[in-house]
Amino acid sequence: MRKTTLLLLCCFFSSFIFAQEYFPKNDGVKEQNNNYIALTNATLFITPTEKVKNGTLLIQQGKVVASGKSVVIPENSVIIDLKGKHIYPSFIDPYTNFGMKKPKKAKRNGRSAQYKPSRDGYYWNDHIRPDQNAIDYFSYDKKLAKEYRNMGFGTVTTLQMDGIARGTGVLVALNDKDGAAQRILDDALGQYFSFEKSVTSLQSYPTSLMGAMALLRQMYHDASWYSKGNIATKDRALEALLNNKKNVAFFEAGSKSNNLRADNIGDQFGVDYILVGGGDEYEMLNKTKQTNASFIIPINFPEAYDVSNPYAAKYISLADMRDWNQAPINPKVLSENDITFALTTFKLKKPKEFTKKLKKAFEYGFDKIKALESLTTVPAQLLGKSDEIGSLKPGRYANFLITSGALFDDETTLYENWVQGTKNVINTQDQKDIRGNYKITSGGKTYDVAITGDVSKPKATIKLGDVEYPSKMDYSANWVTLSFTDKETNEVFRTTGIVPKQGDGFSGKMVNPDGSETDFTAVRQKGGISEEKTKKKSKTEKPEIVPITYPNIGYGFATKPKQQDVLFKNATVWTSEDAGILNNTDVLVKNGKIAEIGQNLRAGGAKTIDATGKHLTAGIIDEHSHLATLAVNEAGQNSSAEVTIEDVVDPEDIGIYRDLAGGVTSIQILHGSANPIGGRSAIIKLKWGEDADGLIYDNSPKFIKFALGENVKQSNWQSFNRFPQTRMGVEQVYVNYFNRAKEYDAKKKRGQPVRYDEELEVLAEILNGERFISCHSYVQSEINMLMKVAEKFDFRINTFTHILEGYKVADKMAAHGVGGSTFSDWWAYKYEVNDAIPYNASIMNSQGVVTAINSDDAEMSRRLNQEAAKSVKYGGMSEEDAWNMVTINPAKLLHLDDRTGSIKEGKDADLVLWSDNPLSVHAKAEKTMIEGTTYFDLERDKQKQKAIKKERNKLIKMMLAEKQNGGKTKPPKGKDKREFTCETIN
């Protein structure tokens, strides 16, 4: 029972709660209000797990004074009796752009790129903006604040989401009544990072994810160097980065794989990022858990696709269908695996969608106590503000919710959201909840009415018999206004009635279409339309979740394949060794290695495969590929030695599986040819179903991509700000960078302090013989030039790739010791390859050059066996020599020939069983094995195709049901999966 009116509360308490004591009082006679407010007899949740029945919450001047069972209420208290009500801490959103001024997007003039920074006195890269303070861009948004409060939020963190290093954020209480001095709880909260460039600058670097990662690493190295006083000039960006070093660090990663990438950077530099995830962490649960990171998780679960058009439905990938089906389990899975996370409205089209998405997470099994923690105590902890917000312990801000019952129950009404002791009414406690089923009788007719929706904004479904009438409903101050239309006659009926405080029904007047009035009575019923809907809904409350596979796309494995001992019997064995081709030969695989080669071998415990009439070879190796990468070029500078493809390996690229079906077991993923000095390579085994780390070779040889020709000088592209513009300039780039790397390396070896430079570190590895160059090349003059540059600095080029004029300089290549990795018969696709001939590979091979056939193309990669066969026709190469060009020769070029590339005892069991001569167009890879594990099996593939078809049909039916039940859908949209080649510049 209230002992003092709420008017007294509003007039005194709210007005003076945050008055600054040193401000002059010139606008009236005022006194400090030191009264208390005691909210009594409530079910009080001090924290999500600390529940007190018949508890009391005592607040004063916007703070919690006491909370619990036996609270002493001072005499000067306003007492509010909340018997039957619940009190919870208000929610916290730890990652928003609430009230942020939208950054102004820079405009480009012409095609020429911007290479230099536009900010003077700051870091050399515009996208590093740790000096950016969100408070400078902030303006409190009352309308949006109300939307957040209506969902239960009392506090939000906001930041300027612009740049790779984004500066600090602001912690804001959603308190409309008091000014910034009270509602801004922290105006320099945290430090924020991402992989996304600033829109306010056109500075070209970085152009890729791997460039963003390299830039972040270099930023930390530079900050360390700067902090030691080694830089004479002032850098305001690095100053800010160092000043905020003790702040909590947040990283907007945005996907399961980027979570790992960001965490790896943090581990390298001792920064424990709180990761803003992508909602797909459930797909990589073990790796996610191994980060030991805390997360902020969006719940922007995707809508179902509209699959009513069967033709359009064909263009929806199975991965996207699964995403719709599986994504809502993410909160449940994370909580069950003890991964600390807070929830956020981030990534939702509109914040008000949050409540609906959260309910969906509950349908998928998310625990409600865990949900409350993820909205209160956990975000407070992550923000380092547990002593201020997130609970109702003494000393915390009086941010709390008053509800009619258990917080997340469908029937529960959120009445009030108090922020810093200021009451905000969401739904009046005086208004009765009239949701339910009724029979309305008027004028001799009886209508079935189901009232659903929110307490304050209910909606009605009206039926007369089996005919449903379109209706509109308004409910305010316990008055009900309901109108409905007879669709056959278009006649409109209007009712107005009062809801009494006692009883289950209501009554009033109905205005008929002719203007006459009749009395009506609405009698509450059991069962009826509403309960039918509830029962129907309850049947779908536990949706069927299709199984996760490895990887979680089409053709993934239900369980990861395991290594197996195998004996191949009576095969034609292409050894790619001096032994040549062996007929009717057995090969025993044990513990992932080739254990024995011979005839009449015993299987022991190994599985026996009859290979009679079939051919067994080493797995194909593609020396030059751009499969399985999320980026191919870092094109923002003329040298990008600091980047590495290993940072952006994509284990979910379907090209991996297709390559396995073509007998490919290893590839070198090369950087593209956008600049003279490109990025470092990733050499991987195509272990379909493993994560990126599981694909990369252990103790992998170190490679880097260089490039010559049209792509790197870009003089025909109006890129006039960029050096080099000529082939002469390309040579000078190499000489300049190697001179700098030589000087840098010499200083290190002398023990002199140097600014750690990731780019020069890599180039120094080349000079020291620790890293090998694979160079994109076409024209003989440039090929000669680079060999001379290398000899000048006393190292050798490892491989010329493409090398379509290799036949002109094969003798010089052999003398230099460089290999050639070429196309079988590509030519005339641009001017500088007009002199290409299909005899190129045979001629280089005949001159003693280690020669390989590569793909540089996703489609060609899966038929390299046929590409190799072309040299039998063009140049009269033997079948064995032709086959060596896709097995042992690329292994030699990649310095892997001691591990793979041939069938030899002790080597990795990277093997392919072919149905026919592997050089034949009729040959099919029946089994492709890597280290004794079968990653492709032709019969298993047929089963997978059937299973995929069945799963697609199941998911389509689910989506159709979603639409029929009134769920939102979106039109099908196929993903543009780019297939990279060397000619793909951006």
Image (cartoon, rainbow, N blue to C red):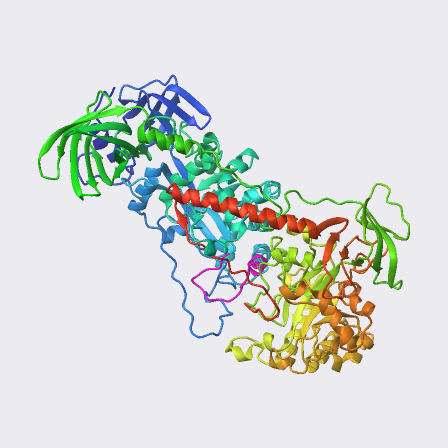
Asked whether 202 falls inside the magenta stretch, the response is: yes
In the rendered image, the quadrant that contains the C terminus is bottom right
x and y percent of residue 281 in the render? 55, 44
| Residue 694 located within the stretch drawn in magenta | no
Q: In the rendered image of this protein, does residue 633 appear above or below residue 724? A: above
Residue 655 image point, x, y percent: 63, 58
The quarter in which the N terminus is drawn is top left
| Residue 411 in view here | no
In the rendering, at what x and y percent does residue 769 appear?
Answer: 76, 65
Left or right of 180? Residue 892 is right
How many labels, in total? 0
- Tell me residue 972's x, y (percent): 45, 54
Residue at image location 24% in from the left, 35% down from the top: 15
Query: Which of the pair 793/664 is nearer the observer?
Result: 664
Residue 900, picture quadrant:
bottom right
Q: Is residue 662 visible?
A: yes
Magenta stretch: give its range.
196-215
